[in-house]
Amino acid sequence: MLRMRRDAAPNSLTLTWRYAGAALFAASVFAIDSFTALGSAVAVLYVLVLLVVGEKSTPQGLYAVAGACIALTLFSYVYGHGLTGEIDVLLRLVFSIAAILATTFILLERLDDRKTVAAQAELLEVTSDAIFLTDASGLITYWNSGAERLYGWPSEEVLGRDPHQLLRSQLPLPRAAINDSLRDHGSWEGEIAQSTRNGRTVYVFSRWRQRSTTNPKLNTILESNTDVTDRKAAIEALAKSEERFRTIFETLAVAIWEHDLRPVKDALDALRASGITDMPSYLASHPDFVRSLRRTVRVTDVNTTGLKLMGIATKQEFFTHLDDFLADADDSFAAFLVALDAGVSSYENEAIIRTRRGEILRVIVAFNFPPRDMLDRVQACILNITERVKAQEALQQARNQLDHALRAATVGEVSASIAHEINQPLAAITTHAAAARRWMDRDPPNLGEVRASLQEASAAAMRASEVVRRIRLFMTRVEPDRMSLPVNALVEEAIHLIQNELGANSVKLTTALEAEGAAILGDRVLLQQVVINLMNNAIQAMQILAPDKRALSVRTVLSGESVLIAVADSGPGFSEEAAQKAFEPFYTTKAGGMGLGLAMCRTILAAHDGDIRVATSPGHMGGDVTIRLPCAIAAFAGTREPSRTL
């Protein structure tokens, strides 16, 4: 049996003996040919010298040996026969030289073949694949270093053994089917599981090539095995990950569908390449272009929840493109394009979609953008917020209706609060009209005084008209008129309007107007009514006290960029429960009260970006209500108005 081994080059001692033996044999042939009378072509024996030397020689060495053999042949001929000889002797000379030359050329070809084989063998050793050769009996005749590294067996231990018994190969097909493929096609390839020397299982992609000859017993099979264990493990892990993803994708309670965004990204890149730098402005001014891009977004997959959301039974029936179900009223796609062009990692926005049944849904769409080479499968998570939006709209509508009801229900209380202000201009009109009539009845009439009285009456009428107009605006939910109002003056006017109630109820008022120079933006009449309402509440709360115990204080003070108006009384104050519920509509502790006064105050203050709070007192002694409003002007004066008692 032929064994192919990776033997080292012959050592110098072996070559020396080989060359010495060849030289001795050549000398013997020369002596016989030159000094004996043999009539045969003895010089033909030089061919044996060439065979001995040429097996391990180089082409140059072979040429030298062949030349030496021819020279010795010619020398023997001349020595024995001279320059002229019989024809049969000359023919033996020619025959001997021809034999030497023919042998030389044959050996040169064999040297070339050996070089080729050596180069191929070197390549087999360099490759990382495990390569081995088997003979017609299926036994190993060659085992490269790649096979040693992969399987752990050195070549000297495996030569002459059956590789598939040794490696416990698990073939994907019966061996007979593989042999049929080798016979019919000369090759076979497939994946094989094998065991290494230490028992580890490896997976290889095996390629078999059969070298056939006329004698089947000389056929050989070359097997080249590439280790795919790690790749197979990675593929299996990827498959498991994909399976887990598909399971999550299909069973998630959130609707998900996949898009192919490559055409959209290409179109946006083309715009950039054409010189477009302000993408938001361009998209806003080219709605047809935005709509055309909607048609290019292809939907590639959808989960079960997405099918249910859109009222579709199977994936095959789902919409093909985004434009098929994105509502005409939706304007979110342009913002999506801006985000995609900007290269953000994630995007979220509200959108309006249309189901198969034609139902319009409000949804939140969330994207995580993958790298450019993965834009063919971009998942969007869809959260249906239609019912939530409807609930919010219904809640807002209910709030608006409640606000309107509060305003309407508070008309009586507000009217009572500002009755004094209306009565004053009406009384002034009556007084000035009567005065004008008296001045006219004089003889002669005092026209100057008449004119002055009529002007005063006209001014009072205009003031009354303004009060009525503010009430109508408040009832119709029109934004209040805003103007710059000095805080201290606003409070003083409110105190002046409630002066009669203070006197009628024996309430002692103390003021500390310390917000000198501060102003707020707001509606004078409405804000005055807030202050009047708080003072009226305090007056009513102190009815249970003796007249000499009824004290009311009003204070204004600057606090950062805000102004505070504090109204405090000596009444029973607020319990903890009352303080928590004070601003709830229809909550009241007064007999016959509507429970809308403080709620209305908070509504008015909220419309002016302000707020109101109630402080509780230990033992509930004394009520303390504070208003906060943002300053329009905060000119800090060097002096403050001193406290005074009215």
Image (spheres, rainbow, N blue to C red):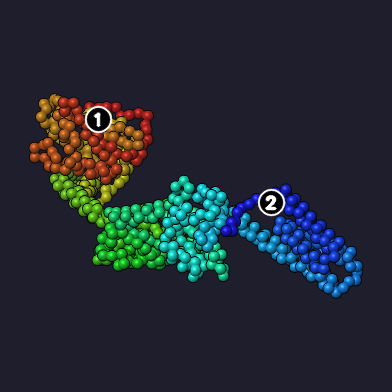
Along the viewing direction, whichever of 256 and 436 lies nearer the viewer? 256
Residue assigned mark 2: 10
Along the viewing direction, whichever of 474 and 175 lies nearer the viewer? 175
Residue 128 seen in render: no
Q: Position of residue 74 (x, y in %)?
A: 85, 65
Q: Mark 2 packing: few (<14 Cα in 10 Å), some, or many (20+)?
A: few
Q: Image point 23% across, 36% down: which residue?
A: 613
C-alpha gap between disc 2 and disc 1: 123 Å
Left of 152 or right of it: where is 392? Answer: left
Residue assigned mark 1: 511
Up-down relation of residue 510 to residue 215 (above or below): above
Q: Image point 26% across, 65% down: which residue?
A: 313
Q: Amino acid at mark 2?
A: Pro
Up-down relation of residue 539 to residue 132 (above or below): above
Query: Element at badge 1?
Result: strand
Residue positioned most to the bottom: 87
